[in-house]
Amino acid sequence: MNNEKITSDLKPIKLLFNEPLSNFTYTKTGGPADCLLFPKSTEEVKQIIDYCNEENLPWLCLGNASNLIVRDGGIEGFVIMLSDINQVTITDTTIKADAGAKLIDVTYDALAKDLTGLEFACGIPGSIGGAAYMNAGAYGGELVDVFESAEIILEDGSLVTYTKEDMDFSYRHSVLQTIKGIVLNVTFQLKKGNHADIKAQMDELTHLRESKQPLEYPSCGSVFKRPEGHFTGKLIQDAKLQGLKWGGAQISTKHAGFIVNVDGATATDYVELIKHIQKTILETFDVVLETEVRIIGREK
């Protein structure tokens, strides 16, 4: 990778070479990105994708890096972060939020306008783009419930608008997991509500989250999808795994569905502990645990 050429060709886009992704992931783990880019507009995102196609460079978009594990070898090619593309526009009961906006912030923007429908998401730390990618949900709600459309740039650089039907939403799934593209913004359709009622629900969900989840440690959030007919945390507890440490990673003593970084954990610690949990639960209960967290990047 010719760093000087890339810097010159992609001016004025902000970029960093060989940047440790542990500086950005919620687990505080992960190796370096060959080139980490921070576009400030849709035009700059398109410029990056077109450049990668011309130069035959691999790329991926990280979102807010909250429900994610980057392996210790880092990521080859371009890594795109949309944190600087974060505008939110509210018109009547419609919210249009850029992909880099934080989902939590958008829920409070909705509250400020007395709009109901996004309360369930008031504690989800991901970005709008990441939330669309995985149909983020909590406490009985999912993004699909309020989703209207998304503007997306596809792998070939074309810009498209996807409706709810196009997104093929299901539990922690969207079509974006089977095609390559980047969400640029999402439009939500909410309803007018009572400010006090909306705030009370958000306060209750925030209290539940703070009392049950290990927010005092770095983590990747909920590690596993909920297996049909079971609760992941209870399975892990019943298998006598809660509290187990693996290197610097630990199955949270507060919520067994979380793995926390308690002592300088590496991504390898996380991945090995996840595999150990899956193996133990399969052998003990004949239940397959699928990861909700994305695991990406190179082995060290």
Image: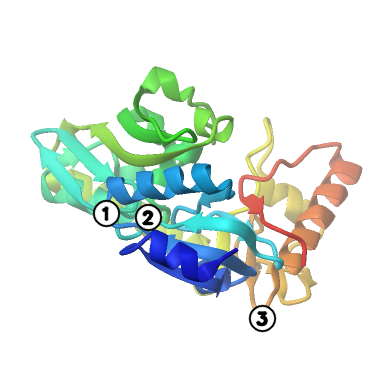
Q: Which residue is mark 1?
A: 86
Image spot of residue 193 (x, y percent): 14, 36
Q: Looking at numbered disc 3 in the image, what kind of residue is underneath it?
A: Gly
Q: Which residue is mark 3?
A: 264
Q: Which residue is mark 2?
A: 82
On the picture, is 240 further left or further right than 159?
Answer: right
288 above or below 162? below
Q: Label 2 crowding class (10 Å Cα cut-off): few <14, some 14-19, many 20+?
A: many
Q: Is residue 239 visible?
A: no
Q: Looking at numbered disc 1 in the image, what kind of residue is underneath it?
A: Asn
On the picture, is 257 further left or further right than 283?
Answer: left
Q: Single out the mark in the foreground, 3 or 2.
A: 2
Q: Are marks 1 and 3 in contact (CB under 8 Å)?
A: no
Mark 3 or 2, nearer chain start: 2
The answer to which image quadrant residue 84 occupies is bottom left
Image spot of residue 109 (x, y percent): 18, 51
Question: Quadrant where the N terminus lies?
Answer: bottom right
